[in-house]
Image (cartoon, rainbow, N blue to C red):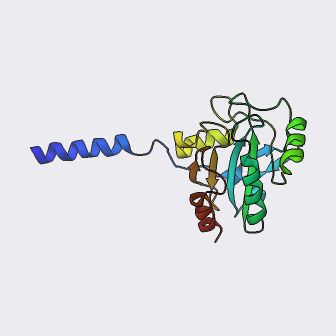
Amino acid sequence: MFNTNCKILFIILMIFFSSSANSKYEKVFYDFSIKSISGDTINLSKYRNNAILLVNVASYCGFTNQYTGLQELWDEYKEQNFVILGVPSNSFNQEKDNENEIKKFCDVNFNITFPMTSIYNVKGDNAHEIYKWAKENHGKSAIPKWNFYKILINKEGKIEETYSSFTKPSSNKLRSKINTLIK
C-alpha cells in the first residue's frame, strides 16, 4: 500500500514539477520574420544554422551600458555562425519613442553594427510572435523580466538557454555556451 501510494505521489510530483514549456516546436526561430530598425523585413531564415542571441534592449535602462559588451561579442563572433539580434522594447517604459532616435543613440554612443529591429513588446498579449513562441516552447523563463534579458537560440532554431539582465555579455557562462553552440 505504502509503495503504491509513494509511486502515485512521485508520478504526480513529476508531472507537476516538469517544465511548463510544451517544447513541441511546431515552428523554430528561423520560421519567423521581424521588421528591422530601418523598416525592412528580416526573414530570420537568413540566420539558419547560426546561434542567435536575442536581446531586448532599451536606451534609458541601467543596463544600457551592456550595448558595449554586446558589440564586443558581435565583433568577436560574427564570423563564426553567431548573430546578435537587438530588439528595442518599451515593455518596461525605458525606450525612446521611435526607431530613428534609437538608431542614432546606438550609433553615436555605442557604434552598434549588429542587427537591430523595430520597437516591439516582448511580454504580454501584445508581444511580438517570437516572444510568444519563446514562452510557448520554453516556459516562463523565456519571458523577459527586464531590459537586456537574453535568449540564446541554438543552430536548430530552438531555445538553448535564457539569461537575466544581470548576466553581462562578457560573462563566462554565456561565452562558454556560445562557444559550445558555434562548434
Which residue is pictured at 49% across the width and 44% down the height? Answer: 21
The reply to whether residue 106 is visible in this rendering is yes
Q: Residue at x 69, y 30 (%)?
A: 91
Left or right relative to 94: residue 41: right
The number of numbered badges drawn on the structure is 0
Q: Is residue 65 above or below residue 152?
A: above
Q: Quadrant of residue 136?
A: top right
Viewer-closest of 73 and 156: 73
Camera-nearest residue between 24 and 107:
107
Residue 39 seen from this side:
no
Residue placed most toward the observer, 27 or 129: 129
Farthest-out residue, left: 1
Left or right: 117, with 48 as reference point: right
Quadrant assignment for the N terminus? top left
The residue sitting at 15% across, 46% down in the picture is 4
The x, y position of residue 60, in whole percent, is 76, 34
Q: Tell me the quarter of the picture where residue 8 sits.
A: top left
Pinpoint residue 94: horizontal percent, then vertical percent.
74, 31
Q: Residue at x 70, y 51 (%)?
A: 31
| Quadrant in which the C terminus is drawn | bottom right
Q: Residue 64 placed where, x, y %? A: 73, 42
Residue 138: where, in percent of width, then height?
Answer: 54, 46
